[in-house]
Image (cartoon, rainbow, N blue to C red):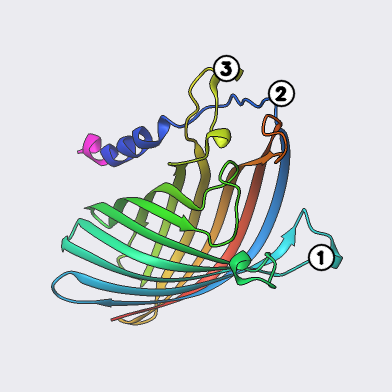
Amino acid sequence: MNKLRLLPLAVFCLLCAHSWAWEYYTSDGYPATTTQTLVQMRVGADFQKKWHNGLRLHLSEDLRFDMFNSLNDISSYKSFNKSYTTLSVGYAPISYFKVDAGYMLKIMGTKDWSDHNEWLRHRVFLGVTGSYKFDNWKLSLRERAMLEIRTDSVNPLEKNQYDWTLRSRLTLEYSCRTQPLKPYVWVELANTLNAPEYQKKYANNDSQNKGHQYITKVHSAVGLKWRLDKQNTLNFFYRFNYDYDRDINIKRKDTSVIRLTEERTFQHAIGVAYEFGM
């Protein structure tokens, strides 16, 4: 039985282990590095409707506000960071398996507001979730393919207009027997699927080696869900995110001059979300 319980964790690690590498290549040497630290407050609302045939409708809103940003001075500080509005449909034909698909509208508070193409982003996703229950514990693994869509003008050598990512999330929950409380913890890895050629990682600093995709995000959370009654729940959480991005700058007149900057972000967030279920 113990071996069976460890199986989802082993599968999770195998799915993402292929992308780890720590050697980088640029045409003019090792890349520059920028490091950012963020502290955020998040508030959200979540509505979910379930039917007896296993069909589910999910609508949520997530607002994020920066309390501290190590790269901003006071004169240019903007507290509103992002807004995520998500609509999805899920289907759970059996208790331990679910598929879902949805659309997310993203509003970027730190972008130029004079042009909606700068601050609007679109995301569509398709995912599958498998879960396993034992005693009061529930272990679940979610694999989700995500397509980020930009409508602004980008250089295809530097960025993608349509960006594919695979996110893998492992979650452990515990349902208290005598209290309406459910503590949980989860960790999620995001792996690029179609990073531009110049943005890929190269092994051993050798441009002759084939570039490959890489892990761009490591997100984690610990939280507590407090069920007020059959329909209303409060979700309190703390999140720590590590984001890694490879910013490419290619000169228009001389495309042989390529500069790569590794951007690392460490983000701490505390938040609360109201959940309503029917």
Magenta stretch prevailing secondary structure: helix
**Residue at figure coordinates x 45%, y 32% from the top left:** 19
**Residue at figure coordinates x 52%, y 46% from the top left:** 217
Residue denoted by label 3: 204
Q: Residues within 10 Å of mark 2 (few under 14, many from 20)?
A: few
Amino acid identity at mark 2: Gly
Amino acid identity at mark 3: Asn
**Residue 143: where, in percent of width, then height?**
33, 49
Residue denoted by label 1: 76
Is 164 situated left or right of 271 in this image?
Answer: left
Residue denoted by label 2: 29
Label drawn at residue 263: none
Magenta stretch, residue numbers: 1-5
Nearer the viewer's eye, disc 3 or disc 2?
2
Q: Are marks 3 and 2 in contact (CB under 8 Å)?
A: no
Q: Secondary structure at mark 2?
A: loop
Q: Are marks 1 and 2 in contact (CB under 8 Å)?
A: no
Q: Quadrant of the C terminus?
A: bottom left
Q: Quadrant of the N terminus?
A: top left
Q: Is residue 2 magenta?
A: yes
**Residue 181: where, in percent of width, then height?**
39, 68
Viewer-proximal residue, 240 or 92?
92
How far apart marks 3 and 2 lie (CA) works out to: 12 Å
How far apart marks 1 and 3 lie (CA) works out to: 40 Å
**Residue 152: where, in percent of width, then height?**
58, 61
**Residue 274: where, in percent of width, then height?**
46, 77
Q: Are marks 1 and 3 in contact (CB under 8 Å)?
A: no
